[in-house]
Image (cartoon, grey):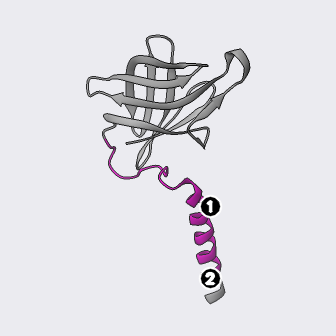
Amino acid sequence: MRAGYHIVTLLALAAVSACSSDVGYQPITGAVAEPTGTYMLLAVDGAPLPFDVGSGPTGYTILSSTLSLAADGTWIELRKELAPGPRIIRSVGRWTQQGFGLSLVGASGVAYAGSMTNTGLRLADAARGYNFIR
């Protein structure tokens, strides 16, 4: 019986260790939190900023991004990029929440889907994943 206890303990430790590289992004549990607020982009596809998207004449670098979700269901994102010179991309739209899940649809066709985490948002568009923190 004691050997079974040790196996369960080792499996639990392995599961926690497997999540350690993703600290700060475990899904939250309990009551559904209010997502309104301002978030800063931390990583794109798991890589820290700056993040290169493509190369050549159509390539650009994401330097930073701020995403704000307002209580009235609107959102705004200001993304600073290099392409080849600096530029600010402004996207706006409406957001909805279902449980921990979020959907953001923009006026210009920008769309994100994802979920809340214990420290921010994990969102994705058709091409990439984005980790935002509060």
Above or below residue 6? Residue 31 is: above
The front one of 33 and 40 is 40
Q: Is mark 2 on a helix, strand or loop?
A: helix
At a point 41% along the width and 24% down the height, the residue shown is 77
- In this picture, residue 8 sits left or right of residue 74: right
Q: Is mark 1 on a helix, strand or loop?
A: helix
Residue at the spot of label 1: 18
The front one of 132 and 5 is 132
At a point 60% along the width and 82% down the height, the residue shown is 5
Q: Quadrant of the N terminus?
A: bottom right
Above or below residue 20? Residue 86 is: above
Q: How far apart are marks 1 and 2 (CA)?
A: 18 Å
Please give the range of residues in magenta: 4-33
> What kind of residue is marked 1?
Ala
- In this picture, residue 103 sits left or right of residue 44: left
The front one of 29 and 57 is 57
Above or below residue 100? Residue 70 is: above
Q: Could you say which disc has been placed on residue 6 in the image?
A: 2
Magenta run includes residue 125: no
